[in-house]
Image (cartoon, grey):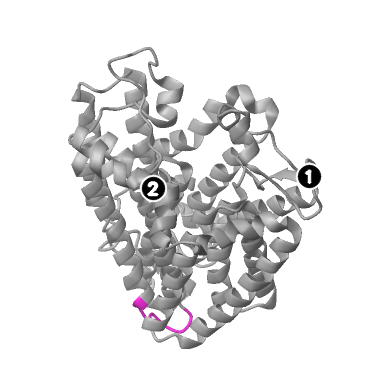
Amino acid sequence: MTVPQLQGPGVLRRRYVRRAPGASLEAVPEGAPSAMRRATAGGGLLASGRLVPLFVCLLIGCQLALLVEAIAPLRVAVRVLAFGVSLALLVLVRGRSLKHPALPFILAALGVTALQFFNPGTGAPLAAVAQVGIQLAIAAPLLWVTRLSIDPRTFRRTLALLFFFNAASAGVGVLQVYFPGRFQPALSSAVQGQGQGYVNSLQFETADGVRVFRPMGLTDIPGGASTGGFYAVLLGGGFLLSARRGLTRVLSVGGILVGLFGIYLSQVRATAVMLLVCLVALAGVLLVSGRVGRFLALLAVMGTAGVATFGWAVAVGGDTVMQRWSSLFESSPDEVYHRNRGYFLTGTFTDVLPEYPLGAGLGRYGMMNAYFGDHGDRERPSLWAEIQWTAWVYDSGILGVLLYPLGLLMSLAFAFRVARSRDGPRSEFWLWGSVLFAYNLGALAFTFSYPFFMSQTGMEFWLLNAALFGALAHEKTVHAHRR
């Protein structure tokens, strides 16, 4: 006679999970090999949350590969690789995507962009296909990431990878100033093509009288270390507030110090302003949520680090660094922005939008035009997009400047709701929701500075937002006794 096996939480050391909201519970033996647990859950790497940090490793690898001179002939292929893999995962990762609040608006924006194939202004067919493809690849994580089973540990590991890479980029930038020429990658061909006068403007004289490029970090663009510094400071603040061990605190503070120092030496004022906006937003969320202790800790560390690293940067960079940063306070913030990027925004709404209310056609600006465009087409000349808002007008006209920003606002609203939540003393979702809220606000601000959502950073944006959404959904579907 066969005795029925008892089932239930805590019985026979089984783990009960749901693969998706509304699905039935599945029992997985706790002692089973990892391969068996994966098979029980649906099987394979393409169903595992580990795919997210592995994809981040791919993004980092592509970035590093661009610094190797031997790979220069394959530069286009390396740039396209990460976007191609994102599109491939959209097909290969099976399952039902969860509906992130931003998804309807982003899909609508992509649909309007796809309709530009019928716009008479669309240029070379290959450039047009590439333009739609790269935009779909950038937003694709909203679909394939939310099909995966992501737990909080995987989400934290993903953030840690981004933190260490960006801190390393800022750190290499510091070495490039201390040891001129020794850690310097080859200068981007796009920068060299701007002429010697422009190249010279990207250099400065240190306190020792040595002329160096603004630190590039792990990029090939002078000043590129500032981007690494931005993410090192922001993510370092999150890890500092969530740290339970001394080593994590030390690494977090180290990343913050190196990141700030890299930003100061890079002299990219827009990045510093955006970082300040993000930190103010993060502090505001902590206060609104009643987490005063965390707010005071953040204020103390960031304030002390900001003052200390500025003095350090001036001691190394000399008067050039001091003059560059003091220029921020010579006029009002709106006047400073207008002199640097503001006139591009004004021109977008006063000139570009009236000329192209329904879009300018596909493949006429940016890297897709440079790589695949028909530069001999006089009826459809190449266009220039210095900021994201101009790019949205070119791609979708007035609908583009409505739909995509609405998607960003939905992402902000979701992150804010997570930041305000209280899911238990050991839950970190509120903290990473706070950090992501600040990060999202910074990304929105960056759209006024450069085409953020036409680059790898835009894909990282949707990857992190989708990962947080998926991890939170997964946490809610795991049986209560295993949380």
Image position of 47 with respect to 442: above or below: above
x 46%, y 50%: residue = 460
Task: Check the picture and name the quadrant holding the N terminus.
Answer: bottom left
Q: State the residue position of label 1.
A: 180
User: x and y percent of residue 62 in the render?
Assistant: 58, 38
Residue 93 seen in the current view? no
Q: Residues within 10 Å of mark 2 (few under 14, many from 20)?
A: many
Residue 3, position in %: x, y? 38, 72
Q: Secondary structure at mark 2?
A: helix
Q: Residue at x 47, y 43 (%)?
A: 456
Q: Residues within 10 Å of mark 1 (few under 14, many from 20)?
A: some
Say what amino acid the circle numbered 1 marks: Pro
Q: Which residues are magenta?
A: 420-426
Image location of residue 168, percent across then percent down: 67, 54
Could you tell me which residue is drawn at 41 percent across and 69 percent down? 433
Residue 422 falls inside the magenta stretch: yes
Circle 2 is placed at which residue position?
Answer: 141
**Closest to the observer, 469 or 296:** 296
- Residue 468 visible within the image: yes
Q: Which mark is residue 96?
A: none
Looking at the magenta stretch, what is its main secondary structure?
Answer: loop
N-terminal of the two: label 1 or label 2?
2
Tell whether 431 sits left or right of 267.
left
| Amino acid on which disc 2 is placed | Pro
